[in-house]
Image: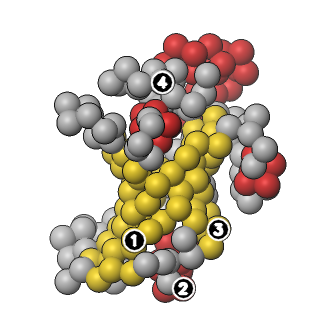
């Protein structure tokens, strides 16, 4: 049975802190646009207070979340955490987000919240949370956490700083639906 809250509760914060992976969903306003759902791993998620969160966003094959958050009248974002061990549970955070770039005034304060800054860090996504939902999670399978992959570090080292900049120019400037991102 689903339960709803207006803010992140202490038990929710504890649950989120235990998870090794979460998902981020966003979508353009147009009905023919593509919904984006991305898995995220590592120690990249922070609860700023009961209604505000942030996560480090790494360079990837696209930049859909940034494009959707930047779209005028949009900004919708959903985070989902699932229990893969322990008691079954699913937790969703619903809200509105924004992209914070290294050139933004808020960057120094936000980046200081993270201890492991990956070489491919391109932005920080922040969100104001207006609804929290928990549900049973009975159908989520049990998994054993084996560790983080090192592929992204190797890829970044191979690209180098100039190669990462070029990659972002080529792959992260425009969304799948042709929307601009906050990177450029």
> With 60 as the anchor, is 139 left or right in this view?
left
Q: Label 2, on which residue?
A: 10
Query: Which mark's residue is nearer the viewer, 2 or 4?
Result: 4
Real-space Cα separation, disc 2 to disc 1, in angstroms:
15 Å
| Sequence-earlier tag: 4 or 3 | 3
Q: Label 1, on which residue?
A: 131
Q: Label 4, on which residue?
A: 180
Position above or below: 173 against 14: above
| Sequence-earlier tag: 4 or 1 | 1
Label annotation for residue 99:
none
| Sequence-earlier tag: 2 or 1 | 2
Real-space Cα separation, disc 2 to disc 4, in angstroms:
37 Å
The tally of labels here is 4
Q: Label 3, on which residue?
A: 48
Q: Nearer the viewer, residue 139 or 147?
A: 139
Which quadrant, please, contains the C terminus?
top right
x, y percent for residue 130: 44, 68
Query: Which mark's residue is nearer the viewer, 2 or 1?
Result: 1
Residue visible at 73% across and 54% down in the picture: 110
| Sequence-earlier tag: 2 or 4 | 2
Real-space Cα separation, disc 4 to disc 1, in angstroms:
28 Å
Real-space Cα separation, disc 2 to disc 3, in angstroms:
13 Å
Q: Is residue 158 visible?
A: no
């Amino acid at each position: 049975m689903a339960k709803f809250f207006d803010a992140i509760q202490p038990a929710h914060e504890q649950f989120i802190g235990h998870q090794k992976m979460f998902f981020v969903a966003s979508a353009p306003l147009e009905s023919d646009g593509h919904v984006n759902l991305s898995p995220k791993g590592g120690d990249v998620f922070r609860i700023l207070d009961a209604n505000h969160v942030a996560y480090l966003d790494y360079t990837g094959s696209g930049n859909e979340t940034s494009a959707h958050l930047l779209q005028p009248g949009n900004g919708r974002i959903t985070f989902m955490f699932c229990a893969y061990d322990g008691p079954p549970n699913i937790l969703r955070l619903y809200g509105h987000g924004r992209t914070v770039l290294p050139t933004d005034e808020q960057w120094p304060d936000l980046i200081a919240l993270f201890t492991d800054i990956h070489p491919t860090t391109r932005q920080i996504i922040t969100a104001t949370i207006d609804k929290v939902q928990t549900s049973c999670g009975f159908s989520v399978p049990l998994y054993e956490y084996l560790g983080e992959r090192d592929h992204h570090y190797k890829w970044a080292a191979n690209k180098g700083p100039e190669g990462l900049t070029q990659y972002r120019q080529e792959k992260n400037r425009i969304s799948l639906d042709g929307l601009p991102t906050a990177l450029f």
